[in-house]
Image (cartoon, rainbow, N blue to C red):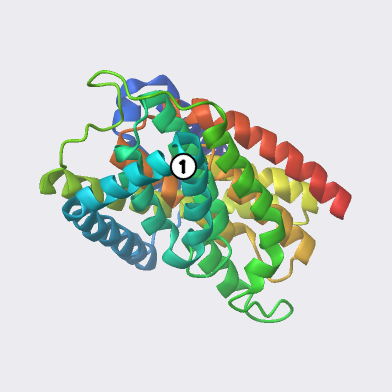
Amino acid sequence: MSYAVIAGLALIMALVLLLPFSIKRVEEELEIFLLIMGVAAMTISGLWNWHIVRESLAEPIKISLAVLVIGLIFKAGRNLIQDTVKFMENRLGVRNAVFLIVILLGFASSVITAIISALILCEIITHLNLDRKSEIRVTVYACYAIGFGAALTPIGEPLSTIVTAKLSGPPHNADFFYLAQMLLVWVTPAILAVSWLAAFERPTARGPVGDTLRQDNPEGTRHVAIRAAKVYLFVMALVYLGTGLSPLAEKAVASLKSWQLYWLGTTSAVLDNATLAAAEITPSMSRAQILSILLSLLISGGMLIPGNIPNIISAAKLGIKSREWAAVALPPGLALLTVYFIALLIAH
């Protein structure tokens, strides 16, 4: 790979990281911007082929259809969700209800998938009696929990599916419970921590009209369809971006130690962590190396909107901007990265 290609890909990565926070139009049209950056990365890397094009068209279908169908179901069952949320608030109090909701969504995501958990979260957020700031905080922490929990089984999210498939042969012989056996003891404290953070600062009651992520007016079918289309474009963009930047990742991965792989995984704050897992994890890695990069990918994936599917769906449905997300997600993400880095050093 020439220095010109390396420089071009590094520039694209820098633009993806910086522009959504500095230019309002880019933030508002994030799907289109990422698609343009993905096409540029593919072109610079010279990786265009019909297989990638077909994958970019097919990969988003299941996710966007799930967003569309579940969105329509939730639209019809809005009153039931509202009654359930009010019951929990009245019986447990807002803080305890939030704590329990985040924990349940986190662990349930390994069975019902991260996509469904994120859609349920969005409907719950709409009915919680919180102001916008509190809603964003709960959403971000819950997406962290969903990302952690979904990695426990191959059906939870694309990252776990990819990793299990790549490690299914010797020497790891990964089966359905391989990731759960490796990660459960590590992700459980993280899920409990973000659940506690979501409820720790006393949530502020909902203020005047306009002070929430979404009003309690029923969502139209058109809005549900537009959101599904945006998710489709977002996932397509991530396929191109992850593939186009993979030569840079693969070049960096060669011969890296566990702690180096750990910090390399922080790039999943900008790129979809499933795509990075596909590019960076190989059967030749030791268990310690795999654990290091997986934990880094899971933590970093919650820090910015493009990092994982729950973030993308929640931000699109609730109208959370990149700067709003980062302001809440970066501090706990950096803290978790530091704590887990130290824990990994002690464990190995």
Is residue 40 visible in this depiction of the protein? no
Q: Is residue 116 left or right of residue 258?
A: left
Q: Quadrant of the C terminus?
A: bottom right
Front in this rendered view, residue 84 or 280: 84
Front in this rendered view, residue 256 or 156: 156
Q: Is residue 281 left or right of residue 201?
A: right
Q: Where residue 26 appears, x then y in whole percent?
A: 34, 28
Front in this rendered view, residue 244 or 273: 273
Image height of 325 relative to 5, above or below:
above
Specify the farthest residue to the front: 91
Image height of 222 relative to 209, above or below:
below
Q: Quadrant of residue 179?
A: bottom right
Q: Which residue is disc 1 drawn over?
A: 92
**Identity of the residue drawn at 33% across and 21% down:** 24
Is residue 280 visible in this depiction of the protein? yes
Q: Where residue 14 appears, x then y in whole percent?
A: 52, 32
Residues packed near mark 1 inside 10 Å, few (<14), some (14 to 19) or many (20 plus): some
Front in this rendered view, residue 308 or 258: 308
State the SS at label 1: helix
**Identity of the residue drawn at 46% across and 42% down:** 92
Query: Number of labelled discs?
Result: 1
Q: Amino acid at mark 1?
A: Leu
Q: Is residue 173 left or right of residue 342?
A: left
Image height of 36 relative to 292, above or below:
above
Q: Quadrant of residue 175?
A: bottom right
Q: Is residue 193 left or right of residue 75?
A: right
